[in-house]
Amino acid sequence: MEDIVAMPWESIYTALNEKGYALLPQVLSADECRHLSGLYADPDLYRNTINMQRYRFGKGEYKYFNYPLPPTIQVLREMLYTPLAKLANAWMQKLGMDITYPGDHKALVAHCHDHDQPRPTPLILRYEAGGFNTLHQDLYGAVYFPFQVVFVLSQAGKDHEGGEFVLTEQVPRAQSKAEVLQPNQGDALIFTTNFRPVKGSRGYYRATMKHGVSEVKSGVRYSLGIIFHDAA
Ligand SMILES: O=C(O)CCC(=O)C(=O)O
Ligand SMILES: [Fe+2]
């Protein structure tokens, strides 16, 4: 795993401010990605398995980890949180929202647990050919953190074709704009969970963002989602 603290956070903040997402190349090695996608088969690690078709979330399957999280995921969740909390607080301030996120992740988890959100949210997703993930937001209760991170654990063009990451942004009184991204294996894609602040003539307003995955055309695509708030 690359040193998260040493990442170019100022330019990451700029990307998040301007686009609502930032791509950090090569945070995990191919070996680390293979190890993590290999965890998919271990039934002891998960609290819940979701068949996406059953809920009409798309087509594919995902599993929510139980506590304790696998060490790599626990470390990534804690290390990515702290620099993002700084920007989260700046966003809440811009939007005039009375929310302050604590500087360390343990305190956010404690806050979630105090608000009846005790269940861990990191997950691994698996899509075969024909699989997809409909546009959605990962809000699991009143307490939410405005950023989340996804790692595509497979290599596009080799392990799978298609399966692009899709982000949409909807500003008030307009239709949605889409961005289509195809991260490489091991890249970290940071994006906003709910909305991002956009500067208007009378201060900042909220642009709602959703994400999903386009249809996987062949092969198998695994991804790891790191959501910082816990679930009800
Ligand atoms: O498979 C993906 O890239 C998207 C996963 C997802 O929706 C998430 O991590 O929240
Ligand atoms: Fe999601």
Image (cartoon, rainbow, N blue to C red):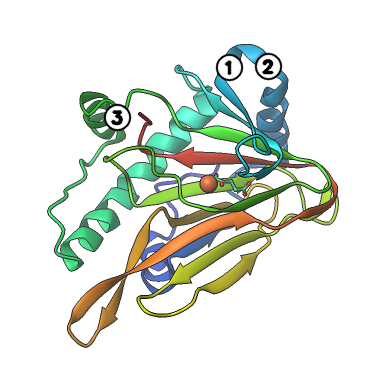
The residue tagged with tag 2: helix, strand or loop? loop
The residue lying at 61 percent from left, 11 percent from top is: 44
Q: Which element carries disc 1, helix, strand or loop?
A: helix
Instruction: Locate residue 130 relative to residue 186 in the image: left or right.
Output: right
Q: Which mark is residue 42?
A: 2
Q: Say which of 153 and 137 sits in front.
A: 137
User: Compared with residue 87, is residue 27 higher up or lower down, i.e. above or below?
Assistant: above
Q: Position of residue 114 (x, y in %)?
A: 20, 25
- Give whichever of discs 3 and 2 has the lower sequence position: 2
Which of 22 and 20 lies nearest the eye of the viewer?
Answer: 20
Residue 97 position, x and y percent, is 16, 58
Q: Place residue 94 in its image quadrant.
A: bottom left
Residue at 84% of width from left, 56% of height from top? 157
Image position of 24 with respect to 148: above or below: below
Q: Is residue 203 left or right of residue 6?
A: left
The location of residue 145, given as percent across then percent down, is 32, 46
The quadrant holding residue 12 is bottom left
